[in-house]
Image (spheres, rainbow, N blue to C red):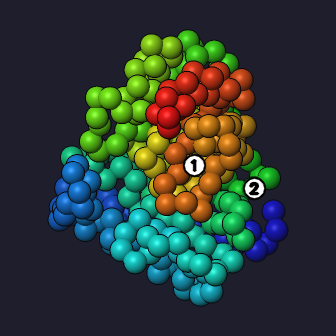
Amino acid sequence: MQSEMRDFLEAAKEAAWIGGKLLLEKLGNASVSVKGPADFVTEADLACQDAVVSHLSQRFPSHAFLSEEGALAVRPSSASHVWILDPLDGTTNYVHQIPFFAVSLALEIRGRLVLGVILDPSLGELFWAAAGEGAFLNGCSIRTSECEALGDALVSIGLPAQLARDSLDAAIMLASAEHCQSLRRTGSAALNLAYLAAGRHDLAWAFTTKPWDVAAGAILLQEAGGTISAPDGGPLDLQTHRVPYVAGATAKLHAAFLDLVRPMLRESSG
């Protein structure tokens, strides 16, 4: 690994731990505000974001940020190096003191993802990956499962805060339940992708996710041997405000799931 990339990765790990420590300190005590229906922001989100951005800005003053809260939620237009941060992925879990939430951080250089870090502070699990270097959990190499059949797949799903009975999300949830082994709705897209990379899950999908939900998990999964795409099978586009994704442990499983959902996508768009 080049020394510059090693510096970026070590700084990302440090920043994630700083943010994760803050989240644990404030768990159960953070004030909560409502952004929309079943959409929360807490004092901990903001404190973690400030701490991570401050740490990285001191190390790399010329770098820019794209993050979930406040002014940083607008993608910077000209920076070559952009950190993509979700300071608290799984806020609803956090508000209810369910220990399944994460700090998710990725670095994009000239539009290309080069590293990702996802920290589960409750379990002390640090997932990370750098382009061409593989994927790791607490220093140990991880790989996706070898699952190739829908009927054998454990699939993690992401649903909008308000789910309409006749929505595309509901239709694909039912199709997943019918054709896959079992479903999980965990409440954290970042950890869904980390678990997929580590071989704990076999499929994952969500259609209302944002760049900060997906960026770190995308490179982690790819470096672990998995496949991630837009729901129509096209490339993942992190430059847009909404980043829907379908991800699979193997290319064959990913393709099988795309074949399952394509008719529903066509019907929804028509």
Residue at the (37%, 29%) spot, across then down:
170
Residue 160 visible to the viewer: yes
User: How far is mark 1 from mark 2, CA to CA?
Assistant: 12 Å
Residue at the (47%, 42%) spot, across then down:
207
Q: Position of residue 160 (x, y in %)?
A: 34, 43
Q: Position of residue 192 (x, y in %)?
A: 49, 39
Q: Secondary structure at mark 2?
A: loop
Q: Please state if 80 lies on the left or on the right of 33 as rendered.
A: right
User: What's the residue type where badge 2 is placed?
Assistant: Ala
Q: Which residue is mark 1?
A: 217
Query: Is 38 above or below relative to 9?
Result: above
| Residue in front for this viewpoint, 89 or 165 | 165
Q: Residues within 10 Å of mark 2 (few under 14, many from 20)?
A: some
Residue at the (38%, 58%) spot, across then down:
88
> Quadrant location of the N terminus?
bottom right
> Disc 1 or 2, which lies upstream in sequence?
2
User: What's the residue type where badge 1 is placed?
Assistant: Gly
Residue 127 visible to the viewer: no
Q: Position of residue 63 (x, y in %)?
A: 61, 81
Q: Secondary structure at mark 1?
A: helix
Q: Is the Cβ of the residue at disc 1 closer than 8 Å to that at disc 2? A: no
Name the quadrant containing residue 86: bottom left
Residue at the (64%, 81%) spot, across then down:
78
Q: Please state if 233 lies on the left or on the right of 127 as rendered.
A: right
Label number found at residue 131: 2
Q: Position of residue 123 (x, y in %)?
A: 42, 45
Name the quadrant containing residue 174: top left
